[in-house]
Image (cartoon, rainbow, N blue to C red):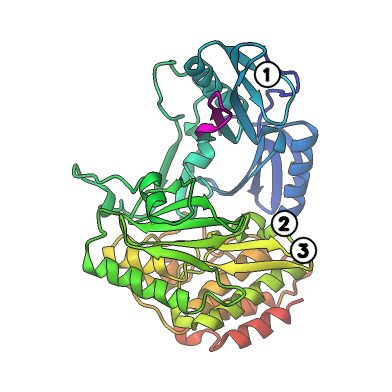
Amino acid sequence: MISHDIPQRSPIEILEQGRVWVVEEYRQGQRTGETLSTHGTQIDAVRSAKTRMEAERRPCTLRWESAHSVSNVYWNPLFDVLTVRYDELLDAWTVAPAAATCAMAANEDRERACERAKRIQRDYDFKRLEAFDRNGKTSDERSHRFLRHDITRSGVRFDPSAVDRTPEPETTNKEDAIAVTSDASTDTATTGSDHIPPASPGQLGASIPDVTKVQFVDTDGVLHRYTTPWGDGTKAEIVAVSRKVADETRVRDAFTEWTSRWRDADDHAHVATIHESGSDPAQWIAYQVGERTLAEAGIDLPVDDRLSLLDQIADAVGALGPEAACGLHPERIHVRDSGGGWHATVADWGTEWAVRNATGTYRQTPFTAPEQLDGRVTPTTAIYQLGALAHLLLCEHLPFDPDAGRAAIRAGERREPTPITGIDDTIVTVLDRALATDPADRYSSFGALRRALLDTV
């Protein structure tokens, strides 16, 4: 039986066409959906799409950054969790949305119920599937294909024409057909027939005190990421070196040096706190994160809050020193509403850049300074990256197309800054200086850049 509370409606997508933002139905990535509305600014388009998504009970909204890059996915709470539970009254395993009142399927066999749940999750676009055992404990979890392939991650290309809803045989566990590639070369640390799998959640859990639930986030490349609840009621992320390169001296030295710089300043209000660190089964650190990242929340905030967050990030950089801050990226900046305003904490601080640089697998992003492409960090590298963050928050688009190659970054072939309402056109001059390709032409201090940004309001 199918619940009438869960209509099978298409997701919504937001894309830019010229200077107009279009809200339309997402038709399996074919870009031929019905146009629902048009808007002059991205933030108006996002608000309209979210309102329509909830009013029409659509599962989610995709906001495109380019033809092959999704910047964010917003989910309808109604489609947040699909569950498989044993119902004693029915003496069967039921498949039902956590936010609805009626089961969508039922089967006496748990395995068949789970297979049916996977198809329902795919067909109705539920964000997460959770399967419980008879005692009510979670035994299996499965994220939506968008999340499994991390299509909002910088450097990941999403092929919209590859989405396929063809029913899968019940005997296979094949992932949904979705093509994801990277502009950078394949990580040498993860290729070859002598593949070494990432550390399992059980292995990490045995090494980290008081951790009871560790989940994979990203286990590609030379650094692997996991998430876990922490003992103080917060959420933590674990970053571990791939076991394939864990014994290489240059990798160990890079990880140790850059995490030590981070630890030296992690008592600062806007620097992510490192909880624990270790070396078994490979070098790892666990640090505190918030519920949302700057990539997820940034352009939804009022202008004053965005400027405040930029000021906090600059303050954090000052605590570490500019040469220790070459990893500023919206996915590594966590934000939370503290009641009196938005609070930011910055993580990573160049650890990923240093380890990838040591293995020759660094992937440039729209926030990469030109000198980093040559394996260098200067006293103004962080000035450049803060300028790129300001470009995103105050113009609502990235300084470089996510598909742009290294040549474009080296030449400074940026997108023309288009300030949002409330920001003066002088921001163009500020960003031009902050994002200068020559490190010597940038602002010489964060104080100067901070004052220049505040003057644009």
Q: Which residue in the protein does label 2 denote?
A: 300
Horizontal relation, residue 36 to residue 109: left or right: right
Q: Quadrant of the N terminus?
A: top right
Which three-letter amino acid code belongs to the residue tagged 1?
Ala
3 or 1: mark nearer the eye: 1
Whether 131 is among the magenta residues is yes
2 or 1: mark nearer the eye: 1
Horizontal relation, residue 369 to residue 298: left or right: left
Is residue 437 visible in the rendered structure shown here? no
Graded by Cα atoms within 10 Å as few (under 14), some (14 to 19) or many (20 or more), the crowding at tag 3 reads few
| Furthest residue toward left | 194
Is residue 89 visible in the rendered structure shown here? yes
Along the viewing direction, whichever of 350 and 397 lies nearer the viewer: 350
Query: Residue at 52% of width from left, 74% of height from top?
Result: 266
Determine whether 413 is above or below 133 in the image: below
Question: SS of the residue at dot 2?
Answer: helix
Spatial CA span between label 3 and label 2: 7 Å
Dot 3 or dot 1: first in sequence order is 1
Which three-letter amino acid code belongs to the residue tagged 3?
Pro
The circle drawn on residue 103 is: 1
Q: Which residue in the protein does label 3 denote?
A: 302
